[in-house]
Amino acid sequence: MFKKILIANRGEIACRIIRTARRMGIATVAVHSDADRGALHTELADEAVAIGPAPAAESYLNTHAILEAARATGAEAIHPGYGFLSERQAFAEAVTRVAGLAFIGPSPEAIARLGDKIYSKKLAKAAGVVTIPGYVGEVIDVSHAARIASEIGYPVMVKSSAGGGGKGLRIVRSEKDLRQALLSSHNEARTSFGDDRLFLEKYISPLRHIEVQVIGDRHGHVIHLGERECSIQRRYQKVLEETPSPFVDPKMRAAMCAAAVALARSAGYDSAGTVEFAVDKDKNFYFLEMNARLQVEHTITEMVTGLDIVELMIRAAAGEELPLAQPDVKWQGWALEARIYAEDPARGFLPSSGRLVHYYAPEEGMIGAATLRIDTGVHEGDDITIYYDPMIAKVSTHAPTRVEAVNAMSVALDEFVLSGIKHNVAFLSALTHNARFREGRLSTAFIAEEFPQGFKSRAMDAVAKRRFVAAAVAAKLARTKRASGISGTLNGPFHGSEKFTVALEAEQFAVDDAFLTGGKLFCKMGGADYSAGINWRPGQPVLRLCDEGQEYAIQLTRLPGAYRLSQGGQQALVAVRAPRAAELAKFMPKRAKPDTSKKLFCPMPGLVVSIVVDRGQEVKTGEPLAVVEAMKMENVLIAERDGVIGEIKVKPGDNLALNDVILEFV
C-alpha cells in the first residue's frame, strides 16, 4: 500500500480524499494555486505545495507543476479527484510512464476509450448498448455542425468530448443559435479540460438522467454499486441527486446495470467510474457518456452500500483485487445529496463570488432516523473566487425511506448558514418541500418547469406567516430585554408586555400583549392567543421556534429597521414596529429607481471574454453584445431591445464586479 499520495485537486473533493487516506494511514500532499493559499484542503493535508497562479490553466491544469510537487514530496501516487485533469489520458500517462507513479484512477488506455465521449459512444455501440442518435465524431466547424444538426433534427445538444459536469454543453433549438453555442462550448471546454473538441447528439425531452456507479480492478473484475438519479439540474449541471431512483423498477435496474458493467468490462475498466444514461418516459434508456473518474455524487452510493469508493480506488491502483463480488453488494435505505453553490437562484443561477462572512454547517450525525454527512472544502472567511467551480459543500442524508431522507435534508438545509455571497440553500430547501419532487416525478426540465421565473421564495400560507411574525417579535423582545440590562441604555429593567405592528413584506399583523418568559413567547396575534417555544440569543444566526410540537430552525439576519427570515425555502423581510411608528412609516418617501434602460450591466462577477459589438453599431433584440466568464461558465449577454451602441466601458480581459456597466446605448 502507498505511504504517501498527492491530490491533484482542490476544494471539497481534496478534503474528502484526505479523509479516507488518513483513515488508511496514508500521508497526503495537497497542491494549491495562489488563490487557494490557506484553503481548507491545504490545512488538512500533511504537506501543501504551491503550483501556480489562480487561473486553472496555470495551476490545477499544469501537469509539470503537479508532477514536480509529487517528486519533491516523495509521493508514490496521485489522485486527480474530479474535473481538471481527472479524465486526461495525457496526464495519466505522464503520471505513470513519465514520473513512474501510480495513478489513482483508470488506466490511460481506459481513459482513452471512455473518457473521450466520442470514442466511448463508438465503444458503447460495439458493446450493444443503445446510444442517443447523433454524430459519432468531432465537429469540424459551424457549417459541419449545421449539416449534422439538420440531419439529426433540432433540438440538438452540443457537448464536450473531453469532460462532463455540464461544462461545454449547450442545447440548440434552431440554426440561428448554433454558432454562438459552438463558440461558448469550445471556450468552456478548453478552459475546463484543456481540450475543446465537440460533438452533437439529439436532445430528448422529457428525459430523466440516471447513472450507474461501477468499480473495477486490474485483475479483470468489474461490478456495479447501483444507480443514482440526477435529473434535478440547472445549466445542465446536477443540483440534487438520490439513490435509488424512484423511477427505476427491478427489471429496468438489472438491465441498466448489466449494460453499464458490460461497457466498463469491454473497455478494461479498472477503477471507479460512472455510466450515464438518458431515460425517456417509457423507461427506455440510452447511453450518454461514461465519466472515467470519481463522481461528485459518489457520497450517496457510499451511504446506501456502506462502501468507501475512494478507498476502493486507492486499493485498485495499488494492484489489489476488489474485496467483494457482485453478490456481496447490499443496498440499504435511501440517500440524497444536495449541492450548495455560490450562485443566485433569482438571477438564473448565475455564479456569485465574495467572502464567506458567515459559514456554519450543521454537525454530522443523526437527524431522527437519518444520518447526515457534510462534505466541504471551505471555512468561514474564505474568498469564493471567479476562477473555479462555485460548489461550496455537499449535504447528504441517508434514511430507511425516501420520505425520511427528504425530511432530514430539509432540516439540515435550514441549519446551514451562509452569508457574504449569494447561495442556493433556500432554493434547495424549497425543492425538498415541492410536491412534484416528493412524488418523484422528475425530469431534467424540472427546475425550468417548476420555477419558470427563477426562484425567490416558496409561497407562504397563513401558518407560515404567523410563524415568521412570531420569530421576528421574539427577536425584537429578546434584543430589547438584552439592551435593558446594559447600564445606561434604558431607564430601569425591561418588564411587561409590548404592542407591535408587524409588516411581513406587504402585509401587516397586529401583535398585542407580547412578552418572553421561561423560553416562551406569549402574545395575541390578530386578536387570538398565540404561544411558542423560543431558543435564541441576540447575535445567533438561527432562531429555534417550537410551534404546536414542531421545531423550526429559522435563519434570522438583522437589517436596518427589519429582519430577513428564511426557513423551508420561504424567505421574507419582516419589520417589527410600535403602532405609531408603523403609521408614520407609511409616509416615508419611496426612493425612485434610477433609469438603467440604456445600460448593460454585468450580471455576475467575472472576466470579460469578448465584446462582440462596436460603438455606433445597430443591434436587434436577441443579438449578442458581450461574453463574460465566471467559475468555468460562459454567459452570453444579449440585447433585450433594438438599439444603437454608445460608449463601451470595458475591454476583453477586464475583471468585473456584479452590476459593473459594460456598455451604454445611445
Image (cartoon, rainbow, N blue to C red):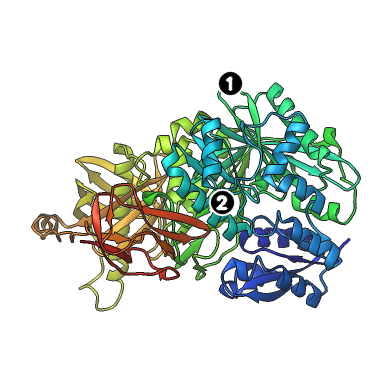
Would residue 168 be found to the left or right of residue 486 on screen? right
Residue 587 in the image: x percent, y percent?
8, 57
Looking at the rendered structure, the kind of residue marked 2 is Lys
Residue 281 in the image: x percent, y percent?
55, 24
Would residue 397 be found to the left or right of residue 357 on screen? right
Looking at the rendered structure, the kind of residue marked 1 is Asp
Residue 469 in the image: x percent, y percent?
28, 48
Nearer to the camera, 257 or 581? 257
* Residue receiving disc 2: 167
Q: Residue at x 49, y 49 (%)?
A: 413
Q: Eyeballing the image, is 302 above or below 582?
A: above
Q: Going by the picture, which residue comes out furthest to the front?
A: 143
**In which quadrant is the N terminus drawn?**
bottom right
Q: Residue at x 72, y 43 (%)?
A: 119
**In which quadrant is the C terminus drawn?**
bottom left
Residue 180 in the image: x percent, y percent?
45, 49
Give the Cα distance between marks 1 and 2. 28 Å
Q: Eyeballing the image, is 246 above or below 8?
A: above
Please tell me whether mark 2 sits on a helix, a strand or a loop: loop
Nearer to the camera, 86 or 564? 86
* Residue receiving disc 1: 282
Residue 99 visible at all: yes
Residue 429 visible at all: no
Nearer to the camera, 207 or 73? 207
Q: Residue at x 70, y 47 (%)?
A: 116
Of labels 1 and 2, the one closer to you:
2
